Structure formats: structure tokens, C-alpha cells
Image: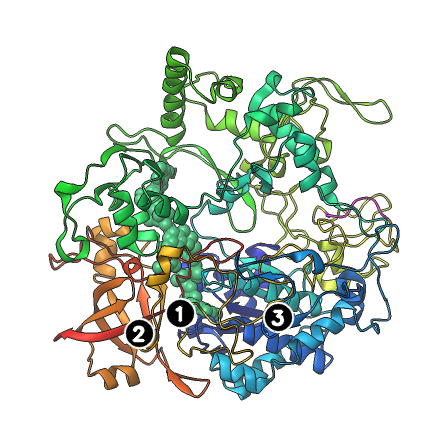
């Protein structure tokens, strides 16, 4: 989230598009209800009339996978009707920047496409530069190569007629929503956007999010209380896991893992540090070397020296992307032989379950660290129709290591609003269970012994690792939290020679990190979470002097305890608030801290330093230079499995040309002749993924796998409420009880009638369902191709067929 949960109450308009918070985030959703009590409107754009829609002012049923067409239509409307916040757009976005003469978009492709590699050479997706390497701008916004004019041209195709043709949303309703959105271009009105997987789990997920971010920039809603782009995160600490680098290509603090092209520290740090391209900008990532070197000092201590590039060679270098979909591919290719699943029930959560089972069946060993006995740890058992394997042919040895769960240990959890909050252990774990940290530490200890005994590749980096916890087999949560925060390794002085820290003291903020080996920090984002004043994540002062829900005394919000990101953009250039009732920061003669911790440094009012301090330009990007794999501006592409076979904007390029489809997955692409219906998958309040399949009370509340079918489709197929239905995709089939509903409507898309079929995720072969018969995994049906930036599978839009197989 750029903002935070409580801040949602400040919005005038809440758009929920790509999520269902009333169901999946019921506690946080109370802030949307608070906003409604204050007079805000709530609009839900979702294929289904879901639980969030049931309390909304407006619901637009949209075809799954078509949001970009809707949102580009909104941008066209805002530009045509002149409902943008002009001063904001001019000064705080890259609207005025001139785009390279070589950039173009034609017949569905941006310039630079390489058909063989299915990727783009992005070199022309850039600005024009002067002889000093500075980006050229035209502040009158008249130049035809200005970003704003290129954008105008790009979105001109997304007329209300075209929006209706692609998305199925009727023009009248579309324009009604545009009108509500347009109202928030007033400086004293804000819109917030809430999204989750309905936006991300698509072959165009990243561009969905960008589309809305661009709208928020045009409206002047970024940096404003009650504004922003707000991702509602999934598991309670999934924000923390991504912060900590638990992504295959990531290091803590969103630094990228070196790859095999990164040959030295200097070369790597140069490649990941952005250059200045506009004078006088903060360009905060210029400090990347300080974050990186401090992290390396945490990892390798004295073994990380200036001479050895801070231990650069100790880090693993990835030769390719190792995401879970690739793991499964490599297993199927017999190139990956062992797998550790730590808190990951792949059989239920990865797409194309049959492919996952086939891959796992080739493994030599599988280690499952989990508090529960999961489907994944029993993938080798024959459960009949829902897992029809030949157990005697599967040689995989499975080790189960029972772990604790969050309530059985101390620690902090980071929520969607970037707040780290400490929690205390509630009780001891049962049986032989041990905390994850302890299990991993014991594995490390044992591996160390083996290395010492037998030697082997990689021993240097293993031995270089710092491991100075009081009990090496069991580092405590307190030790880890302090280590992530970081220490001074020597007495540290400011430029005027004043002592800032004595050697060994905890650091207060990431601005104090150094790249000369005198500071440590396991994660630069978390500096300040545990200082000499104690554990900041345990703070529980909820006073709110602004009345805007900005409680800086509660927990610790990264970065630097800041509650709203880019807040300098909530004030005009001269430092006056766009809306005096929505002001969190102000100039105090020294800096901008007031109710919130400001992003902006010490530049006084009137300075030409932009508010978007993390971009080299200092402004928000309406045109994303060379960052995003599938285009500097979003474009509507059909899902890989499209119900209409064509792209009404450009029939030659139907789906996103950069989607990653492994060769063996080509046979898994279904056509709408065989599979005419659009399926989407989602969760229910009564369940948490498949954990609750092992909890009788949850199963009583929602007992059995069902499929939601609209009334018209049900009538066509002769299906009645309660009938048993078989749902088939190119990947396999499942069976479910029919729920015939008004909540799913047929849509008119490009002259055809398109029906949606809705499938909750939860059940699987082990699930209790009250009737003794086993469940199926919804993910038997889903495809494993991945979005080009994130490799997220297209779980939310694929094609199926349905048929009745039993009476109610
Ligand atoms: N009770 C409960 N809460 C949970 C979880 C749980 O298992 N149970 N899981 C947690 C996790 S890990 C996560 S990631 C979050 C997920 O939170 P959400 O993403 O809010 O949850 P989903 O149920 O996947 O709902 C996505 C919504 O997107 C809609 N949708 C599908 N396709 C499209 C599309 O193309 N466009 C638009 N506009 N909408 C679309 C679906 O109809 C659905 O209403 O929930 C978290 N909260
Ligand atoms: N079709 C479809 N598929 C989806 C989605 C969808 O919307 N549609 N959503 C996707 C999303 S957003 C997500 S997040 C994934 C979820 O995928 P998973 O993360 O695989 O799902 P969970 O069932 O939450 O599995 C987590 C496991 O962690 C265990 N666990 C809990 N606490 C601890 C702990 O402290 N330590 C350890 N070691 N284990 C613990 C639980 O018992 C559980 O078995 O599914 C994805 N799959
Ligand atoms: Mo998730």
C-alpha cells in the first residue's frame, strides 16, 4: 500500500477493482465502511456481484481479464473531458518529458519486439536526452513527443464503444463510473483504489496495476490521505516475506539477486543504481550501495571486506529465474531432484495440479515443513478420482518436519500498510513441532558438520556466514529483529565531527547506513524498528492528532515510520496543501515532518525537487521508461485462453506477446470451441486456503466444493441448484455442486454472449466435506503460464466447459 488501512476512511471514492475485501479482508474493510459513513461512494468492478458489491453504491460486472480496456477508457475520458489535476500533472508527473523519436506502438506491438525470444528490446522506451544526459521536457505540454500527448494518442482507441465491446460493461454504466472518478480530480477530493488478486493473477497483471496508478497520478491522488494505490496483501505476513527477499530473484529490501552476468561488486552495484537524469532530484536509490554493503556486513561480518567486494562472491548467482512454476518444469524434466516446501501447500496452490503431481513423483526427496499434514506431503497417495496416482511407482522419499505456527512464537508481522507489529507467543507448540528458525538453524549446523567432514563446493560462503546468536541452533526473534535493524560497527560521526553512534549501538534510520563497512543492516527498510529506545514494533500509542488516522506511535511502518508515501505530492510546489483538511506534513523551517514522517528531505518550499523521491526523475511515471517487460504504457491483450479469439484493437496480436509459456505447456492451451466458458477462482470468508479443510467448524460453515453458474447458462445446460457438475479445462477436470445464481451475468463481448463460471479454492483430496467423499482441487483446472514481469499464473481467467453429471 502507498497509504494504509486506516487511511481508507479519508477517501471520497473507493474503487474496488480486482479484489473482494469484504470477503478476503473483512477486518480491514471496516475502513471502507467508515469512509461510507463519512459520505464516500463505493464502486465495485468485478465479474461477480460479490460480498463487497453487496454494500457498494455501484457494481459493474466486467469480463475477467479485460480491466486494462476499462481503465484506458477511463484515461481517455479524463483527458477528453479535461478532468485531471493540471498543476499536479505538470509538476509531479512525467507528462512534460519528451519521448525518444524511435518509440512507437503499432498493430499491437511496442517498438523493439523480438518474436523468437518473446521479449522487447526496451532501449527506445525512453526519454530524449540533452548533451549532458539530462532528460528533455516541455513544460507547456505542447510538443507532440510529450508523454501526455503520446498517452492521449495511445488511449484514443479506447472509446466507450470499444470499452463495452471488450469488457461487456455497458457504456452508460461505464460513463457513470467515469463521472464519479473524474470528480476526484478536484484538489480537495480523493479516490482510493483497493485491489488484490483480481488484478494480479492475469497474464497482464502488472499493467492492470500500472493503469490504475496512472489514473491516480492524473487525478492528483497519489501522496494524498484518502488516495493512493493500495494492494491488499494475502497471508498476514506476506508483505514481510517480500520485504525480506523471499522471492526467487530478490534480496532483502527489494534489491535484486545478482545473476551470472554480474561479475563483480562494482559492476553489479553500478547496474542496480539509477543515474541522475534531471537536476536537483533526490533519486534516493543513489544510496543503494549503502543498503547493499550494510546487508553484506550483516551476512558475512568481518569476512566482507572492501578488498573482496564486500563478499560479493559469497552470494549465489542465479543463472535463470527459479520461480515455483520453473521448479515444477525442472522436476518434470528430471533436472531437479529435491524440494523443500516450507509453509507451501503446492498441490492446492500451484496451477495445473496434474503437472505438479507428475513432477513431484520424479523427485528423489521432498521435505515438508508445516504445522499440518498437507495434501502436498501426501501427493503420492491414491485418493481415487481426485488424485489418481499409482503409488507403487513413486519413489520420492518424504520427510515431514512439523513446525509451530505464528501463535506459538514471538515476532513481528508486517501488514499491507507496511506496519511491523510485534506479537507475543500465546502458548507452547504441541508434540515434536519446532519453530521454523530452529529447524533451519539445525539443518545449517548439520550441513556445516558435513562440509567440515567432506568438503565440497560452496564451503567458503557457508563458512563466511555470521552466526553469532546466543544459541546457534535457535536464534531468538529479538536477536533477529535487531540484526535486521542494524548496528554501528565503529563510533560514527556526522560530517561536522559530532558523535552520532558509539560502536555497537543500534541505528535509528537508514539515512545513517554507510558503504564503507562501518554499519550493518539485514534489511535497509527495517532500520528504525529496534533502536536504543527499544522495540518500536511493540509501540501501542494510538493517538491521532491529525484525525486522519495517522498514528505514528503505533508499531513501526517502513520506511522510516512513514504512514503515507509520497506525501510531498499532497502539497503544491510552494508547500500549500491541495486540501487543508487533508494535510499530514508541513514545512517547519528545517524539514517537512508534522503529523507524519515526510519523504522529502530538507528542501524548502518552492524547490524544484520532485516529490517522487524513489524515481530518478523525481516525478510519477505516466510512461514507464525501460522498466516493465510488456510496454511503457498498458495495452489491452486478451487472456491466453480467450473466449473471443481476437483482439478487437488489433487482430494480429491477440494475447500479450511476452507471456512466459514453457514449450510443454502449449498443449495445455484450450480453445473456446471446446471450452466456451470463462472461469475464475476465488476464496471465501469461511475458509483460509486449504488449512481450514482440517477444521470441522469451518467445514460446517462451507461444507462442499461448489461452482457458481449464472441462471441463463444453467438453463441452457439443464443444470439445477444442487446438481453435481463436471468442470473441465484443457488441464483436467473437477466435480462440484451447482450454485445457480443471479450474481453472475452473461456479458455481450465483441458480439458474442460470454458466460462466467465461478470456482472457490479450498478443497482437495484430503478435505473433510461432511459426506465422506473427497474434494477435488480447483487448481486441477488452472494454467501455469506466467505474466512476463512476475511469472504469476493466470489463475483468474481461463476457459472451461461444464456438464451435469448427477442430480441434486
Ligand atoms: N477468508 C479468507 N481471507 C483471505 C484468504 C483466504 O484464503 N480466506 N487468503 C488471503 C490471501 S493469500 C490473499 S492473496 C487475499 C486475496 O484477496 P482477493 O484478491 O480479494 O481475493 P479473491 O477471492 O481471490 O478475489 C478476487 C476477486 O477478484 C475478482 N476477479 C476475478 N477476475 C477479475 C478480473 O479480471 N477483474 C476484476 N476487476 N476482478 C476480477 C473475483 O471475482 C473476486 O471477487 O485474500 C487473503 N484473505
Ligand atoms: N486457483 C487459484 N490458486 C491460487 C490462488 C487463487 O486465487 N486461485 N491464490 C494464490 C495465492 S494469492 C496464494 S498466497 C497461494 C497460497 O498458497 P500456499 O501458501 O501454498 O497456501 P496455504 O494453504 O496458505 O499454505 C501455507 C501452508 O503453510 C502452513 N503454515 C502456516 N503457518 C506456518 C508456519 O509458521 N511455518 C510453516 N513452515 N508453515 C506454516 C499451513 O499449514 C499451510 O499448509 O495460493 C495461490 N493459488
Ligand atoms: Mo496470497
Q: Which residue is mark 2?
A: 675
Q: Residue at x 51, y 24 (%)?
A: 479
- Range covered by the magenta-colored residues: 598-603
Identify the secondary structure beneath mark 1. loop
Q: Is residue 278 left or right of residue 170?
A: right
Q: On the rendered image, what quadrant is the N terminus found in? A: bottom right
State how far apart marks 3 and 2 are (Cα): 42 Å
Disc 2 versus disc 1: distance between alpha carbons? 9 Å
Up the image or down, 263 lies above or below 360; here it is above
Q: Residue at x 47, y 19 (%)?
A: 459
Q: Name the quadrant where ligand 1 sits.
A: bottom left
Magenta region includes residue 601: yes
Residue 13 image position (x, y, % from top left) = 59, 71
Cβ–Cβ under 8 Å for marks 2 and 1: yes
Q: Nearer the viewer, mark 3 or mark 2?
A: 2
Label 3 close to label 1 by CB (< 8 Å): no
Q: Closer to the N terminus: mark 3 or mark 1?
A: 3
Is there any visible trace of residue 689 in the rendered image? no
Q: Which mark is residue 641?
A: 1
In terms of image quadrants, where is residue 227? bottom right
Amino acid at each position: 500500500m502507498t497509504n494504509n488501512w486506516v487511511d481508507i476512511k479519508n477517501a471520497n471514492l473507493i474503487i474496488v477493482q480486482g479484489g473482494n475485501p469484504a470477503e478476503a479482508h473483512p477486518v480491514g474493510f471496516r475502513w471502507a465502511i467508515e469512509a461510507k459513513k463519512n459520505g464516500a461512494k463505493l464502486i465495485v468492478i468485478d465479474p461477480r456481484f460479490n460480498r463487497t458489491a453487496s454494500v457498494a453504491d455501484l457494481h459493474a460486472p466486467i469480463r475477467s481479464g479485460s480491466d486494462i480496456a476499462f481503465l484506458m477508457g477511463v484515461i481517455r475520458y479524463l483527458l477528453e473531458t479535461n478532468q485531471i489535476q493540471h498543476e499536479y500533472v505538470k509538476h509531479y508527473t512525467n507528462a512534460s518529458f519528451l519521448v525518444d523519436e524511435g518509440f512507437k506502438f503499432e498493430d499491437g506491438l511496442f517498438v523493439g519486439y523480438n518474436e523468437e525470444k518473446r521479449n522487447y528490446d526496451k532501449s527506445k522506451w525512453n526519454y530524449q536526452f540533452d548533451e549532458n544526459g539530462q532528460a528533455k521536457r516541455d513544460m507547456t505540454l505542447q510538443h507532440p513527443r510529450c508523454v501526455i500527448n503520446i498517452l492521449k494518442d495511445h488511449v484514443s482507441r479506447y472509446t466507450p464503444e470499444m470499452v463495452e465491446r471488450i469488457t461487456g460493461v455497458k457504456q452508460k454504466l461505464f460513463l457513470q463510473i467515469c463521472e464519479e472518478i473524474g470528480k476526484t480530480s478536484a484538489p480537495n477530493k480523493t479516490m482510493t483504489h483497493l485491489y488484490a488478486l483480481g488484478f494480479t493473477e492475469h497474464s497482464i497483471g502488472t499493467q492492470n496495476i500500472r493503469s490504475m496508478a496512472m489514473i491516480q497520478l492524473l487525478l492528483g491522488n497519489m501522496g494524498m490521505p484518502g488516495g493512493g494505490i493500495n494492494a491488499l496483501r494475502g497471508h498476514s505476513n506476506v508483505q514481510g516475506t517480500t520485504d525480506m527477499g523471499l522471492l526467487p530473484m530478490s534480496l532483502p529490501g527489494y534489491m535484486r539477486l545478482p545473476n551470472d552476468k554480474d561479475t563483480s561488486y562494482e559492476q553489479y552495484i553500478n547496474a542496480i543504481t539509477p543515474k541522475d537524469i534531471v537536476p536537483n532530484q533526490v533519486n534516493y536509490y543513489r544510496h543503494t550501495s549503502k543498503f547493499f554493503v550494510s546487508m553484506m556486513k550483516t551476512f558475512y561480518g568481518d569476512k566482507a571486506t572492501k578488498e573482496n567486494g564486500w563478499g560479493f562472491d559469497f552470494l549465489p548467482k542465479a543463472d535463470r529465474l527459479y520461480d515455483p512454476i520453473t521448479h515444477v518444469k525442472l522436476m518434470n524434466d528430471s533436472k531437479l531432484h529435491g524440494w523443500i516446501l516450507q509453509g507451501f501447500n503446492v498441490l492446492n496452490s500451484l496451477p495445473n495440479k496434474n503437472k505438479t503431481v507428475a513432477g513431484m513423483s520424479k523427485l528423489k526427496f521432498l521435505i515438508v515443513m508445516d504445522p499440518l499434514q498437507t495434501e502436498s506431503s501426501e501427493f503420492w497417495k491414491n485418493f481415487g478420482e481426485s488424485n489418481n496416482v499409482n503409488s507403487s511407482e513413486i519413489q520420492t522419499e518424504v520427510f515431514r518436519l512439523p513446525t509451530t505456527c505464528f501463535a506459538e512464537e514471538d515476532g513481528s508481522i508486517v501488514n499491507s500498510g507496511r506496519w511491523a507489529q510485534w506479537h507475543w507467543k500465546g502458548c507452547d507448540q504441541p508434540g515434536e513441532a519446532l519453530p521454523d528458525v530452529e529447524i533451519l538453524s539445525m539443518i545449517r549446523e548439520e550441513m556445516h558438520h558435513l562440509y567440515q567432514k567432506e568438503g565440497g563446493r560452496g564451503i567458503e560462503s557457508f563458512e563466511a556466514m555470521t552466526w553469532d546468536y546466543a544459541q546457534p541452533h535457535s536464534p531468538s526473534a529479538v536477536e533477529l529483529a535487531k540484526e535486521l535493524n542494524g548496528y554501528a560497527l565503529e563510533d560514527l560521526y556526522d560530517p561536522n565531527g559530532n558523535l552520532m553512534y558509539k560502536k555497537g549501538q543500534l541505528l535509528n534510520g537508514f539515512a545513517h547506513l554507510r558503504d564503507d563497512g562501518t554499519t550493518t543492516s539485514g534489511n535497509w527498510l527495517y532500520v528504525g524498528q529496534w533502536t536504543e529506545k527499544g522495540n518500536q514494533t511493540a509501540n501501542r500509542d494510538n493517538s491521532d492528532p491529525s484525525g486522519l488516522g495517522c498514528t505514528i506511535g503505533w508499531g513501526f511502518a517502513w520506511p522510516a515510520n512513514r504512514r503515507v508515501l509520497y506525501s510531498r505530492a499532497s502539497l503544491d510546489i510552494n508547500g500549500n496543501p491541495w486540501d487543508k483538511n487533508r494535510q499530514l506534513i508541513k514545512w517547519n523551517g528545517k524539514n517537512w515532518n508534522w503529523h507524519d514522517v515526510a519523504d522529502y528531505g530538507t528542501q524548502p518550499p518552492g524547490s524544484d525537487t520532485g516529490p517522487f523521491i524513489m524515481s530518478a526523475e523525481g516525478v510519477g511515471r505516466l510512461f514507464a521508461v525501460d522498466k516493465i517487460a510488456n510496454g511503457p504504457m498498458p495495452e489491452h491483450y486478451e487472456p491466453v485462453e480467450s473466449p473471443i479469439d481476437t483482439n478487437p484493437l488489433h487482430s494480429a496480436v491477440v494475447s500479450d506477446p511476452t507471456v512466459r509459456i514453457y514449450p510443454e505447456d502449449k498443449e495445455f492451451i484450450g480453445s473456446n470451441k471446446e471450452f466456451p466458458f470463462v472461469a475464475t477462482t476465488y476464496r471465501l470468508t469461511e475458509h483460509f486456503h486449504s488449512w481450514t479443510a482440517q477444521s470441522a467448524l469451518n467445514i460446517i460453515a462451507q461444507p462442499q466444493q461448489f461452482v457458481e453458474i449464472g441462471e441463463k447458462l444453467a438453463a441452457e445446460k439443464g443444470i439445477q441448484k444442487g446438481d453435481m457438475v463436471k468442470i473441465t479445462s484443457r488441464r483436467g477436470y473437477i466435480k462440484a455442486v451447482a450454485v445457480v445464481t443471479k450474481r453472475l451475468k452473461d456479458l455481450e463481448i465483441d458480439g458474442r454472449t460470454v458466460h462466467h463460471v465461478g470456482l472457490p479454492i479450498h478443497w482437495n483430496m484430503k478435505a473433510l466435506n461432511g459426506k465422506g467423499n473427497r474434494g477435488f482441487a480447483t487448481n486441477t483446472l488452472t494454467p501455469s503460464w506466467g505474466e512476463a514481469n512476475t511469472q504469476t499464473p493466470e489463475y483468474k481467467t481461463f476457459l472451461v466447459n461444464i456438464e451435469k453429471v448427477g442430480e441434486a
